[in-house]
Amino acid sequence: MRNTTTPAFLLALVLVTCGNLLHNIDAFNVASTNATKRRSLIHRHVGVSHIPDNLDLGQNAVSTPTTSLVNTPSSASTLNPIQAALTKYAMISYISHLCIALPMVLFPTFLKNKVMMTLGLQTKSASEHEALRVSQECASTLLKLIPFMNLQISSPHMQEQAGDEDPVPTIWVSNHVSMLDTFVFLSSDEQLRGKNRRPIKTIYWKGLDSNPICKLVFSMAGFIPIDMAANGSGNPNEYNRASFKNMLKETKLAINEGFDIFILPEGQLNPAPEAGLQPVFGSPFAIAKSSKRPIQMIGLYGCHHLWHADEETGMKVVGRDVKVKVFPPCTKEFESAEEFIDAFNAVVGTFGASGQELSSEELDHWLT
């Protein structure tokens, strides 16, 4: 007689996990709209000799009003009701499967790295980099199996550097439109930054640790939490001073260990990307100036058509097309935070609003 105990147990475990996941998804969506998302990711970067202790990542950071770039509203669906429903449940299925798969693929990595580090055969930074690569491969593979979005990546400059053994240490900056942004960057990192890309780390809002999957991935990858108040959208950041100082200390260490930095300068989800960016903070300029490294801008468009930052819209799917554009490296040396902010609004804000980039002449004006 066949033993059905184990399959039944596994099925129950999967159902419980998916139930918890859907609860977390709903909680994330509410939190992302009722309060400022202090999930501003700062991914780290190589070779910085010094980051000033008074570096401000938001509270007194410079910001400018965004340009009104009105485009087709998110409510104008390109899908019929059946397509929208199928896309929505495929998206939920992807997130559910990812939350089940990540612990399974990371556990062997955890054990191996633990043994290797104990024996002195592997450094902590190498272990963190490997954990992130495993997570990225898992996210990428699942997206191929459950292609709920039509992901279009334009990164010719990274393709040109794909054969580089030692890519240029870079500070990456992007707009932030949806909770799906994390999954997009996780699954497409190799296409965006090249096969031989440098390791990358994230400074993230500590509140995300309430989700066990986020906590697992972020801790194994060595991401750095920062405790920040959940203020209203566009309001000044309020952070825990002790947490902020600890973040700076660990960021300096990670920089010296050879990590790229990735920053979301808006510091929060944008509930109206068609109208331009949220107020942009000047932190990338401060880090770039301190590290003497170039800034590379990334534009993201379309995630909000799947999972909107506005609570009332939420997962009301109106489109499947998601575009990610890696712009040419900034050879221009910005003289001030305001100058960086103007360039970011012009280059990334335009793309985030419409999915269309500026002309070559305009890009040259802002970036070179």
Image (cartoon, grey):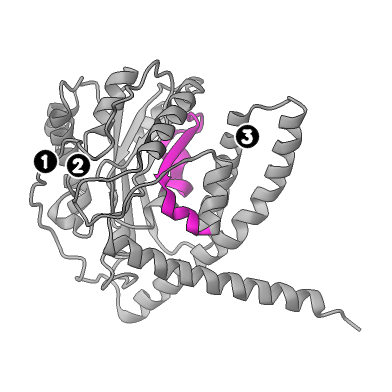
Residue underneath mark 2: 280
Measured as percent of width and height from the top left, residue 261 is found at 39, 32
Residue to which mark 3 is pinned: 127
Q: Which mark is residue 292?
A: none
Q: Which residue carries the number 1 mark?
A: 64
Near-viewer residue (232 or 146): 232
| Distance (Cα) linking label 1 and label 2 | 6 Å
Residue nearest the viewer, comparing 262 with 30: 30
Q: CA distance from mark 1 to mark 3?
A: 40 Å
Residue 73 can be seen, yes or no: yes
- Tell me if 285 is positioned left or right of 39 in this view: left
Is the N terminus in the top left, top right, bottom left or bottom right quadrant?
Answer: bottom right
Height in image: 101 above or below 19? above
Which quadrant would the C terminus be assigned to in this image?
A: top left
Instruction: Write the residue at 24% across / 55% down.
Output: 270
Q: Is residue 58 magenta?
A: no
| Residue ID at (21%, 42%) | 348
Q: Mark 1 Cα within 10 Å, few/some/many (few <14, many 20+)?
A: some
Question: For the residue labelled by badge 2, is the local secondary structure a helix, a strand or a loop?
Answer: loop
Report the amino acid beneath label 2.
Answer: Val
Ranked by sequence position, the earlier of labels 3 and 2 is 3
Q: Is residue 188 one of those drawn in magenta? A: yes
- 103 lies above or below 237: below
Q: Tell me where the magenta segment starts and ends, as one range.
A: 185-211
In the image, taking residue 84 as reference, residue 331 lies left or right, namely left
Residue type, mark 1 in image:
Thr
In percent of width and height, residue 173 lies at 30, 37
